[in-house]
Amino acid sequence: MTEFVKKTKQGAIVYDSGIFDQVSEDLFRARGWKTVEPVTGALRSAGRGNTLIVSDGSRDFVLRKYVRGGLIGRLIKDTYFWKGEDDTRSFAEWRLLKNLVKKGLNVPIPAAAYYRRTAMFYTADLLTVRIPGIQSLADRILQAPGSDEFWESLGVAICRIHAHEVYHADMNAYNIQLDEKDEVWLLDFDRGELSPTGTWKQETLSRLHRSLRKIKNLSPGIFFEEANWQKLLDGYFSESRSE
């Protein structure tokens, strides 16, 4: 991947020249694409309505606007305090994904990232190459139960991500995605980083566990039981011992 940065009137775009010969702000506007469709999914897996699937007719991408969640998101939807270009949410995630792709991990390929600055604040967007045929873990276990081997394989995949010291700030049943072969992909590395120390590995697992319990409450018929979680942990710790 070859990184280029293009300055715009109020911000900048970082992009992979192997994907785009030239870029403009239109890449981050729905009207700049031939086709546009919202990301959909059951059990709130479509997020906050900030993500679109866009296409130029030959290639598909995922366009995501950075928006805030929680209570603060009700007051300040999509602006962040300016701390410098390298610290923008979009540039930081683009470069982290670039690093993870080089490591051979199952994450989206970053295509371009953008920020637009206004005084001491900025807004940001990220464009990644669409991974075909994936669905969230939440949607997957809403449709059919997973075998013991399925849950163990999830634990193994998470452990392998952790073995590369990759901290994911929001590992949940929506950001873990599976393709048609049940191979695991991890999305949304906003606020993620490479971190060799700390208690974050256990905290990440706990966050995922809470997410699975939450969707079980949303839909009691979903195929998740505590025994499944134990199998996931079995896979995780078995893999960690083999490292």
Image (tube, rainbow, N blue to C red):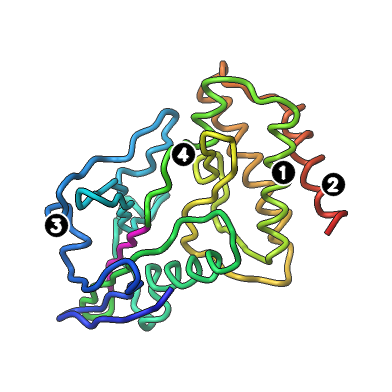
What residue sits right under mark 3 in the picture? 32
Q: In which quarter of the image is residue 145?
A: top right
Judge the density around disc 4: few (<14), some (14-19), many (≥20) Cα neighbours within 10 Å. Answer: some
Q: Earlier in the sequence, mark 3 or mark 1?
A: 3
> Of tags 1 and 4, which is closer to the observer?
4
Distance from the alpha carbon under mark 1 to that under mark 2: 9 Å
Q: Is mark 4 on a helix, strand or loop?
A: loop
Q: Which amino acid does label 1 sit on?
A: Gly
Disc 1 versus disc 4: distance between alpha carbons? 18 Å
Q: Which of 204 and 182 is in front in this view?
A: 182
Q: Is residue 154 magenta?
A: no
Residue beneath label 1, please? 155
Residue bearing the label numbered 2? 238
Assess whether residue 124 is covered by the magenta stretch.
yes
Q: Is mark 3 on a helix, strand or loop?
A: helix
Q: On the rendered structure, is 152 left or right of 145? A: right
